[in-house]
């Protein structure tokens, strides 16, 4: 188990529920309902230890285990794959809810997504998505493979027409690690009828180490983050579709992929002043979106270069802006600066980029999660943040007033009694009616439905 600044402070009793990061917190909630009067505005109280040893929640909340890795899929197609990651929730008929769940499986994964005829891209790859159908009481009615033969499906995002865009955080070529096809693409998944979308890569959206997407519901432009693990780090992209907001399958019509250039800012991690504003953001066409010879982040974007950032992960749309997260940056690994998390806001109408929030070092002492990763907007108007760091793993709530509160703690140790370790949370999302929070534990792969007094 890694020992971090957060753990040291916790043992010293220096952590409280008031966050001390710097930045204009209210900007994170643009376009969401004001949560005045909701109990969630100041948290739901301390977590109560779970006698079953799975998930600690505040008093008044309860969970249901929807699915666990290794159990039989209800479709009879095999077993539930492992490495549960990003997830989306969709409205169905008769009060039903449909979930699409990513499986971030590499070529060496023990529990891969079973290959299914008509839904498999590369039969040698073990990633993909599974889909769950829940009735109006939250009981699982069906569970099946939604797409297979993809690689390292990390996060993604939902479309206005009710499909899930699953992202491969991988850019291996055919012939590498046993793969028979190139990887590094986005795939569209229909949560109700997966065969309608099949296993077709949206190649014009770029081939790189995708993380997450956010779609502008007014223009159909798709924003994409890249979580590259080596220097130079990832880019922030936008995809201009030829058929914007055209419904299921429209993204197959292609479009133009561009990368963000912030004038005179080659590395976002060098910016450490919350509220810093950059006007005149430029979007530069990607020379080779298929990265046939060179990864996109290494391609020649001209004498003015391009803007990079380490650990570009979460991405969501709020109001008239897109927000994206850099989970951390470390100068020892090649970044221009050090931080434990940044949240950036881009306003397309004004071509303006703003650093909204900066997490430590030197600015905060507890951070909602040590490295903010998956993020979703909560019904109360705040944020839910999945922790992806060392030590205990939590889902945290973050209110408009700057209060951080615990929502859930993973109790399933994947270590030993002498050195316990806990898998990270991922894929936090809410049912369309806002009454249920769904969240995954990455390892052991477990999907939870959490109900309680959310309002």
Image (cartoon, rainbow, N blue to C red):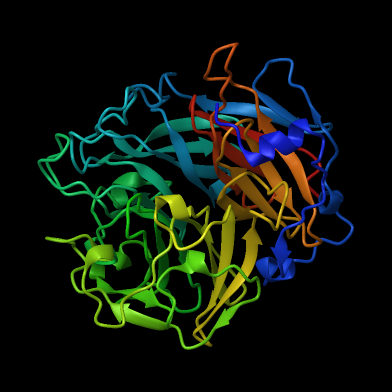
Q: Position of residue 341 (x, y in %)?
A: 58, 55
Image quarter of residue 21: bottom right
- Which of these two is toward me, 211 or 161? 211
Please name the residue shown 68% across and 31% down the image. 409
- Left or right, 116 with respect to 347, comes to left
**Quarter of the figure with the N terminus:** top right
Please name the residue shown 39% across and 56% down the image. 334
Please name the residue shown 71% across and 54% down the image. 364
Please name the residue shown 47% across and 31% down the image. 142
Q: As displayed, is residue 163 above or below residue 204?
A: above
> Would residue 396 be visible to someone looking at this image?
yes
> Would residue 32 be visible to someone looking at this image?
no
Q: Position of residue 336 (x, y in %)?
A: 45, 63
Number of marks present in the image shown: 0
- Which of these two is toward me, 418 or 60? 418
Q: Position of residue 418 (x, y in %)?
A: 59, 12
């Amino acid at each position: 188990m890694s020992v971090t600044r957060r753990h040291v402070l916790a043992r010293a009793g220096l952590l409280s529920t008031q966050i001390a990061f710097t930045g204009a917190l209210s900007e994170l909630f643009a376009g969401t309902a004001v949560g005045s009067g909701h109990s969630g505005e100041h948290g739901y109280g301390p977590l109560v230890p779970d006698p079953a040893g799975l998930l600690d929640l505040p008093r008044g909340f309860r969970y249901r285990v929807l699915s666990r890795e290794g159990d039989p899929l209800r479709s009879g197609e095999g077993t539930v794959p492992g490495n549960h990651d990003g997830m989306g929730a969709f409205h169905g008929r008769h009060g039903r809810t449909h979930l699409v769940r990513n499986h971030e499986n590499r070529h060496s994964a023990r529990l891969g997504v079973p290959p299914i005829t008509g839904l498999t891209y590369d039969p040698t790859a073990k990633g993909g998505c599974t889909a769950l159908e829940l009735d109006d009481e939250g009981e699982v009615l069906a569970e099946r493979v939604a797409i297979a033969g993809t690689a390292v499906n990390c996060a993604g995002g939902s479309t206005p027409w009710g499909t899930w865009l699953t992202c491969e955080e991988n850019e291996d070529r055919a012939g590498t690690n046993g793969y028979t096809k190139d990887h590094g693409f986005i795939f569209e998944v229909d949560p109700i009828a997966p065969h309608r979308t099949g296993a077709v890569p949206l190649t014009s959206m770029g081939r790189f180490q995708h993380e997450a997407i956010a779609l502008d519901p007014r223009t159909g432009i798709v924003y994409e983050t890249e979580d590259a693990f080596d220097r130079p780090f990832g880019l922030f992209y936008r995809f201009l579709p030829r058929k914007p907001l055209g419904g299921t399958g429209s993204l197959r019509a292609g479009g133009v992929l561009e990368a963000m250039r912030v004038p005179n800012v080659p590395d976002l991690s060098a910016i450490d002043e919350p509220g810093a504003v950059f006007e005149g953001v430029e979007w530069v066409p990607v020379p080779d979106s298929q990265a046939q010879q060179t990864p996109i982040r290494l391609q020649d974007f001209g004498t003015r270069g391009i803007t990079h950032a380490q650990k570009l992960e979460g991405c969501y749309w709020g109001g008239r802006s897109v927000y994206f997260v850099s989970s951390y940056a470390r100068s020892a690994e090649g970044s221009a600066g050090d931080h434990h998390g940044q949240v950036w806001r881009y306003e397309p109408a004004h071509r303006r980029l703003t650093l909204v929030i900066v997490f430590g070092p030197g600015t905060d002492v507890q951070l909602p999660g040590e490295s903010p990763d998956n993020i979703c907007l909560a019904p109360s108007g705040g944020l839910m943040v999945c922790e992806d760091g060392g030590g205990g793993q939590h889902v945290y709530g973050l209110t408009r007033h700057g209060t951080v509160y615990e929502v859930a703690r993973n109790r399933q140790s994947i270590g030993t009694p002498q050195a316990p370790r806990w898998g990270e949370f991922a894929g936090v999302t809410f049912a369309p009616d806002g009454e249920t929070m769904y969240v995954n534990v990455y390892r052991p792969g477990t999907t939870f439905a959490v109900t309680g007094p959310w309002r």
